[in-house]
Image (spheres, rainbow, N blue to C red):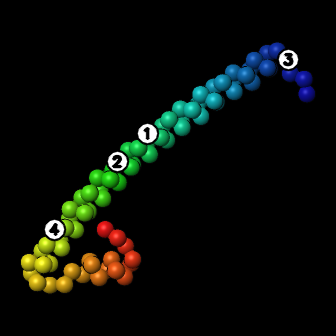
Amino acid sequence: MILTEEQKKHYQNVLAFEKAQIEDFDRQIEEELAKVKDRLAELQASKKAARQMYDAACQRLGIPNDLEEQDEDDGADL
């Protein structure tokens, strides 16, 4: 199939436009991933602080820490 000069220009414009779109999407994806990573770090720090408070409260009350047992069952680390 032979393209006219006008058709070639059209498809070249489409290529340039879509390439710019893809690059913009990649940039937006990276920005959103960075936000998510920051939020996850905040949540993990908050969870760690809450867990320390929970552990201390269990010790003060002289009761077993049910979360510790749950973590052992799940194989999770803090």
From the image, which quarter does the C terminus lie in?
bottom left
Most extreme residue toward the top is: 5
Judging depth in this view, the residue of 63 and 11 nearest the camera is 63
Residue on which the image places disc 3? 4
Residue on which the image places disc 2? 38
Calculate the distance from the C-alpha at mark 1 to the C-alpha at mark 3: 41 Å
Mark 1 against mark 4, which lies toward the viewer? 4
Mark 1 against mark 3, which lies toward the viewer? 1
**Residue 77 relative to residue 17: left or right:** left
Residue on which the image places disc 4? 53
Q: Tell whether label 4 touches label 1 (CB within 8 Å).
A: no
Mark 3 against mark 4, which lies toward the viewer? 4
Q: Amino acid at mark 2?
A: Asp
Q: Earlier in the sequence, mark 1 or mark 3?
A: 3
Secondary structure found at label 1: helix
Above or below — where is 53 with respect to 38? below
Calculate the distance from the C-alpha at mark 1 to the C-alpha at mark 2: 11 Å
Q: Earlier in the sequence, mark 1 or mark 2?
A: 1
Residue on which the image places disc 1? 31
Most extreme residue toward the left is: 60
Q: Residue at x 64, y 30 (%)?
A: 18
